[in-house]
Image (cartoon, rainbow, N blue to C red):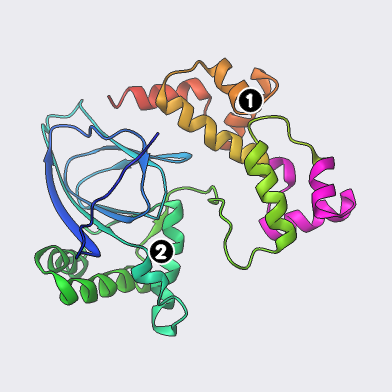
Amino acid sequence: MIFEKIDLGQSEAIKCRSYRLLSFDIPFHYHPEVEIVYIKCGNGKLFLRDSITDFKKNDLFIFGSDTPHLFREDKSTLQNYIDIEVIHFNNELISKMSHLQEFKLINTLISESQNGIKTNVDSNQEIINLLQVIIDTNGLSRYVNLLLFLHNLKSENLVKLISNTSPISQNEGVPERLSRVIKYILNNYTTELSLTTATKIANMNKSSFCRYFKLHTRKSFSKYVNDLRIDYSIRLLLEGHLSVSEISYECGFNSVAYFIKQFKKSKKITPNKYKTAYINTD
């Protein structure tokens, strides 16, 4: 997976580009800018963190800051090119206004985009027109229409989340005690993690800690760790350099069989079949 640097330029906060591609040649990647991708023509699969979903004409996607994603075209069809419109914008355009009531829906949408957002706008000419206005204009007009576009998407309940895995971040509002535990997990989830160590970091006994952790994360300690490891394993699977056995140990699982069991439990598919689904889109 690579970090992609988006050059917004010195005087732009929003950048719009149109592409006609024979294939998607950008690997699994992420960037700090929020990204909107509108599929004007073409079909294939999108790989996003822990999920695979199809894309087709008039699908629209929004990826939040640092959300890893990858598009792969379907080469089995007669379509020999992909037309897309791509919009990047700095998240600060929204975050600096997030305390305002008028920005509530937009802020919620941007927060949800950390899990990837998908919608199809085939029958929504108003949204398509707004998107085109954003692309065709610049300056303040582009900014205002972007806000209107995001607001309408959320207010009309047009979007659905792609991934079910909650991105991990040190967001404001996370209790300091939990923040210390999350930091310990993030620094050690690819090696052996100790529940005993986590309880000591939180300065709590085991039963109290388990209740506290689940209350704030909506997951047990073990599921939280396993989800992180499965998320990481998917990145390694898509990069294609390691075997399933090597990936299981690289992600902190002590048993290949247990890794496969947990992967299938989470994704309803084995690691090998997941990898095959990715390869077959090449």
Classify mark 2: helix, strand or loop: helix
Q: Quadrant of the N terminus?
A: top left
Q: Main secondary structure of the magenta part?
A: helix
Q: Amino acid at mark 1?
A: Phe
The residue under the point 27% across, 49% down is: 6
The reply to whether residue 268 is visible in this rendering is no
Q: Give 135 or 72, whichever is nearer the viewer.
A: 135
Query: Which residue of the protein is positioned furthest toward the front in this rendering?
Result: 10
- Identify the image quadrant of the C terminus: top left
Seen from the viewer's position, the closer of residues 133 and 128 is 133
* 57 up-or-down from 258: above or below: below
Locate residue 73: give its quadrant.
Answer: top left
* 10 Å crowding of disc 2: few (<14), some (14-19), many (20+): many
Q: Quadrant of residue 175?
A: bottom right
Find numbered disc 1 in the image and state the secondary structure of the residue it sits on.
helix
Q: Earlier in the sequence, mark 2 or mark 1?
A: 2
Q: With 18 as the anchor, is 282 left or right in this view?
A: right
Residue found at x 48% / y 27%? 236
**Left-right relation of 204 to 7:** right
Q: Which residues are magenta?
A: 196-223
Vertical order, 106 against 226 (above or below): below
Coordinates of residue 65 in the picture (x, y in percent): 40, 54
The mark found on residue 43 in the picture is none
**In this view of the protein, which residue sits in the foreground, 37 or 156?**
37
Q: Whole-percent x and y of residue 15? A: 20, 59
Q: Position of residue 25 (x, y in %)?
A: 23, 32
* Number of the label disc, if any, that sits on residue 259: 1
Look at mark 2 in the image and give the residue it sits on. 110
Total marks in image: 2
Residue 74 appears anywhere in the view: yes
Q: Which amino acid lies under the numbered mark 2 shown in the image of this protein? A: Ile
